[in-house]
């Protein structure tokens, strides 16, 4: 078999579903051809291979390239002052109702040009890449007008041209009510559905549509209208659900066959059961939980009982999770949510890919998928979760390079 490159003398954590646990293969070998995995398995079982380059991994571990499936990476400004206010006891809701929160980032993002948004986002993206990320999802939602939402999405797409990484974009026009809406949420949702979603779809700037279903944002009925519009334009949906209150977000996501429901700290058993029936991924965001000092944890035991796939993500954003480390995200998820090593690693590879609707292409080390890999200087996979502030990445491979 002809191939471009071979990595051998490696220990593989394939995360493949047809293998138990992490899908470990000792004395493993990976061969790539034209950016895809041509073979992944034991050296003993490998066919005859011819490659222009062979890399001895010296018994290092290889995992799939990491996937951050929920970020708000493109924005302007920062909200360090709000962090100070929270330290003094102000709640997220109080800050938002006083004109801070999302709207303060909206004002800064509207003032910024597309090039400025790209340049300010690149260091955040580079931090993720430096830890082995090969795919990242980026939401809009800090424009809240057609002009500025399109600007954000174009900036997100541009990041994928400046760096060797796959960028999935998500339209989040239903993130907050802009000041010019004068409190009329229904009228603004009309604009989202009738103007923004058609334009986003026409320009092919988004891979999915998201919404913030919450007491400080939009009601289930309003989000349902957004989802209907997304469906009319062939765009899959996902949802910020049940973060601060149980508004039935998990069940709403299930009703519309969403790719994922994210946050879920306040979700009840009925919502989780609906997600299981609809085969929806739960995306947990431990960075926001930690940063906001929340006390209601997502219902991990219910997710396990109903066999709902669990992904985890940074939720990188300026106000509630200024986090650009998937490694630290795993540590927080294990420490605070009590996720296992396997759940954490699957959560930033296989299940994160599933949450983006891309499991057929990425997320596991299997023949036919994109050759996106992370090679680690570790003795055992648990080190990736156990160590804090330490990056053992030896090499990152994207599309076989």
Image (cartoon, helix red, strand yellow):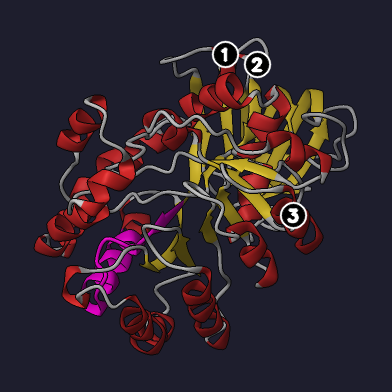
- The residue where tag 2 is placed is 382
- The residue where tag 1 is placed is 386
Label 3 vs label 1, nearer the camera: 3
Which residue is found at the position 20% from the left and 59% from the top?
Answer: 106
Give the image quarter of residue 374.
Answer: top right
Q: Position of residue 218 (x, y in %)?
A: 42, 67
Task: Judge whether 186 appears above or below 302 on screen.
Answer: below
Query: Marks 2/3: CA distance?
Result: 33 Å
Q: Are marks 2 and 3 in contact (CB under 8 Å)?
A: no
**Nearest to N terminus: mark 2 or mark 3:** 3
Q: Are marks 1 and 2 in contact (CB under 8 Å)?
A: yes
Q: Position of residue 232 (x, y in %)?
A: 55, 88
Residue 154 lies in the magenta-colored region: yes
Query: Marks 3/1: CA distance?
Result: 34 Å
Residue lying at the far left in this picture: please name it. 111
Which residue is found at the position 78% from the left and 38% from the top?
Answer: 304
Q: Position of residue 369 (x, y in %)?
A: 69, 52
- The residue where tag 3 is placed is 270
Q: Position of residue 165 (x, y in %)?
A: 44, 49
State the extent of the magenta-drawn residues as a range. Answer: 137-158
Give the image quarter of residue 275.
Answer: bottom right
Secondary structure type for disc 3: helix
């Amino acid at each position: 078999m002809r191939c471009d490159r071979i990595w051998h003398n490696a220990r593989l954590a394939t995360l493949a579903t047809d293998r138990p646990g992490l899908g470990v293969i000792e004395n493993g070998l990976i061969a790539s051809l034209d950016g895809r995995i041509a073979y992944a398995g034991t050296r003993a079982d490998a066919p005859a291979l011819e490659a222009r380059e062979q890399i001895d991994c010296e018994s290092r571990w290889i995992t799939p390239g990491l996937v951050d499936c929920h970020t708000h990476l493109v924005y302007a400004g920062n909200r360090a002052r709000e962090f100070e206010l929270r330290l003094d006891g102000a709640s997220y809701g109080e800050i938002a109702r006083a004109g801070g929160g999302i709207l303060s980032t909206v004002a800064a993002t509207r003032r910024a040009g597309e090039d400025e948004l790209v340049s300010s986002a690149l260091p955040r993206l580079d931090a993720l890449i430096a830890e082995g990320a090969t795919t990242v999802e980026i939401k809009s939602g800090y424009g809240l007008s057609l002009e500025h939402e399109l600007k954000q999405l174009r900036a997100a797409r541009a990041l994928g041209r400046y760096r060797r990484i796959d960028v999935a974009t998500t339209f989040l026009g239903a993130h907050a009510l802009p000041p010019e809406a004068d409190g009329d949420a229904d009228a603004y949702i009309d604009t989202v559905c009738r103007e923004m979603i058609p334009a986003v779809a026409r320009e092919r700037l988004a891979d999915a549509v998201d919404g913030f279903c919450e007491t400080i944002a939009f009601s289930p009925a309003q989000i349902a209208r957004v989802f209907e519009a997304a469906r009319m334009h062939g765009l899959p949906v996902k949802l910020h659900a049940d973060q601060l209150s149980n508004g039935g977000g998990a069940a709403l996501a299930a009703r519309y066959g969403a790719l994922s429901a994210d946050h879920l700290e306040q979700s009840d058993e009925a919502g989780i059961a609906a997600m299981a029936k609809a085969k929806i991924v739960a995306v947990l965001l431990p960075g926001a939980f930690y940063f906001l000092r929340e006390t209601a944890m997502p219902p991990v035991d219910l997710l396990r009982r109903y066999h709902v796939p669990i992904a985890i993500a940074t939720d990188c954003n300026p106000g509630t999770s200024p986090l650009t480390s998937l490694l630290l995200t795993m540590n927080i998820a294990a420490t605070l949510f009590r996720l296992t090593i396997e759940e954490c690693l699957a959560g930033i590879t296989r299940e994160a890919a599933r949450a983006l609707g891309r499991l057929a292409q990425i997320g596991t080390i299997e023949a036919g998928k994109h050759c996106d890999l992370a090679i680690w200087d570790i003795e055992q996979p648990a080190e990736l979760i156990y160590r804090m502030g330490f990056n053992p990445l030896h090499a990152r491979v994207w599309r076989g390079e």
